[in-house]
Image (tube, grey):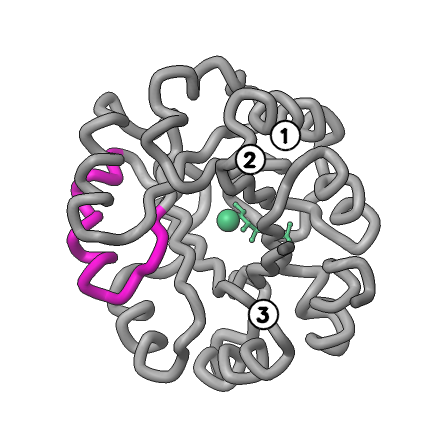
Amino acid sequence: MIKVAPSVLAADFSILKEELVSLEKAGADYIHLDIMDGNFVPNISFGAPVIKELRKCSKLVFDVHLMVEMPERYIEDFVNAGADIITVHVESTKHLDRTIELIKSYGIKAGVTLNPATPVESLKYIINKVDMVLVMSVNPGFGGQSFIEYSLDKIKEIKNMRPDVDIEVDGGITDITAKRVIEAGANVLVAGSYVFNGDYKEKIDSLRGGK
Ligand SMILES: O=C(CO)[C@@H](O)[C@H](O)COP(=O)(O)O
Ligand SMILES: [Co+2]
């Protein structure tokens, strides 16, 4: 089953609640929430209080992608705000194992994320502890960038390393790249600019292969 996770980074922030309702009606599985601190990535987005407000108007799975330095400092805040999945970058913490354990201690799903140039080998000791691996197929920080081709090799390597783990791909996903990442082994697709430029239902359906 392919899951589609629209990234609200590309939504109209002045009507964010309405956007979530529209995405739910259009068949989205998750809502992907990009948290940027202006330090780990050169951009600032929004924080836990915004997620807490959005939680009141959506039952969709909240997939929180933390692009912040030392994410362990904020896990509790995002859990309290209503996160269902929290994903942290291997590059963002000295204590990845402790951070994954902390996320799991709240009874929610834990994911680990790799920047494009970070090798899959860095997952060797953590992959059996996580629910999801997020492959960044662009350099994190901004929406609307082009898909990095070598991400396909990384997806295949992760699939070989642990066939049953959820593999999410984030960055430059369109109907064309979606088909390719699914073939490589991905089952969760994040899409921002592609979904928000057009009819949400048509776009979401097209990411699943037109079904
Ligand atoms: O995490 C990020 C960017 O850092 C993403 O979730 C983007 O928001 C995806 O945007 P598109 O590439 O789909 O426009
Ligand atoms: Co993201």
| Label 3 CB sits under 8 Å from any ligand 1 atom | no
Whole-percent x, y for residue 45 in the image: 41, 57
| Membership of 82 in magenta stretch | yes
| Residue 43 appears in the rendering | yes
Q: Are marks 3 and 1 in contact (CB under 8 Å)?
A: no
Marks 3/1: CA–CA distance? 22 Å
Residue 155 disc label: 1
Q: Are marks 3 and 2 in contact (CB under 8 Å)?
A: no
Residue 135 disc label: 2
**Dot 2: few (<14), some (14–19), or many (≥20) neighbours within 10 Å?**
many
Quick one: SS at disc 3? loop
Residue type at mark 1? Ile
| Label 2 CB sits under 8 Å from any ligand 2 atom | no
**Dot 3: few (<14), some (14–19), or many (≥20) neighbours within 10 Å?**
many
Q: Quadrant of residue 77?
A: bottom left
Residue under circle 3?
28
Marks 1/2: CA–CA distance? 7 Å
| Membership of 160 in magenta stretch | no
Q: Observer-nearest residue: 139 or 179?
A: 179
Where is 17 relative to 198, above or below? below
The residue segment tinted magenta is: 70-86
Q: Earlier in the sequence, mark 3 or mark 2?
A: 3
Going by the image, does 114 lie left or right of 80? Answer: right
Question: Which is in the foreground here, disc 1 or disc 2?
Answer: 1
Q: Count how many numbered circles sit on residues in the image.
A: 3
At x 44%, y 54%, the residue is 34
Residue type at mark 3? Ala
